[in-house]
Image (spheres, rainbow, N blue to C red):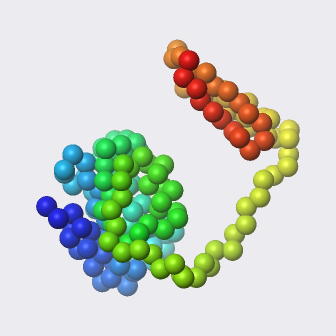
């Protein structure tokens, strides 16, 4: 089966509703798990990217967000947002048809900065530690905290 042909059919669905024509399919063990197309404008939802919608459908169908052993076929190289979601969902590989335009304008002017509130940061680190200690209770995991921007590091005992 040509998975990219199915992704292309999904892209045409986006085109037909005046969306950026992007379509994708997610495959596991040679079988179609999910397919989707862009609906960002149609649904008035910033998360309406084809890749994110496809991943959500797959997670629901497989009853896990951990999509190890899968391949995502997508018509356009994933944007930064989708790339992060793809990596977080542990998809093994991505196959795309066309690269994104390198000269595309960046309209997002959001700036992020680290809050300098040591008391709140320490309280939050304790909360994180309690959460992960609770999750790993009874296992041989060691949770080690580092201060500043390093965060949590998990080492096997």
What residue is rendered at 69% in x and 69% in y? Answer: 110
What residue is rendered at 81% in x and 41% in y? Answer: 120
Residue 39 visible in rendering: no
Which one is in front, 57 or 29?
Answer: 29
What residue is rendered at 73% in x and 66% in y? Answer: 111
Query: Residue 156 at what x, y percent from top left?
Result: 54, 23
Which one is in front, 48 or 5?
Answer: 5
| 41 w.r.t. 128: above or below | below
Residue 66 visible in rendering: yes
Which one is in front, 152 or 47?
Answer: 152
Which one is in front, 2 or 40?
Answer: 2
Left or right: 92, with 123 as reference point: left
Left or right: 147, with 11 as reference point: right
Left or right: 145, with 20 as reference point: right
Query: Residue 117 at what x, y percent from top left?
Result: 85, 46
Left or right: 8, with 50 as reference point: left
| 149 w.r.t. 40: above or below | above
| 94 w.r.t. 100: above or below | above
Q: Considering the image in quadrants, where does the N terminus appear?
A: bottom left
Q: Considering the image in quadrants, where does the C terminus appear?
A: top right
Query: Residue 153 at what x, y percent from top left?
Result: 63, 33
| 45 w.r.t. 122: above or below | below
Query: Residue 78 at what x, y percent from top left?
Result: 44, 66
The mark total stands at 0
Q: Which quarter of the figure has residue 106? A: bottom right
């Amino acid at each position: 089966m040509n998975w990219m042909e199915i992704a292309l059919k999904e892209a045409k669905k986006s085109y037909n509703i005046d969306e950026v024509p992007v379509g994708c399919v997610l495959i596991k063990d040679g079988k179609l798990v999910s397919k989707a197309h862009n609906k960002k404008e149609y649904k008035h939802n910033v998360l309406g990217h084809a890749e994110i919608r496809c991943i959500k459908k797959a997670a629901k169908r497989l009853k896990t967000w951990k999509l190890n052993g899968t391949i995502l076929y997508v018509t356009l190289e994933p944007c930064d947002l989708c790339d992060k979601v793809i990596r977080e969902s542990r998809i093994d590989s991505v196959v795309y048809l066309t690269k994104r335009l390198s000269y595309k304008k960046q309209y997002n002017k959001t700036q992020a900065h680290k809050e300098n509130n040591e008391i709140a940061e320490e309280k939050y680190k304790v909360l994180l530690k309690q959460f992960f200690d609770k999750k790993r209770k009874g296992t041989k995991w060691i949770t080690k905290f580092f201060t500043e921007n390093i965060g949590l590091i998990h080492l096997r005992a």
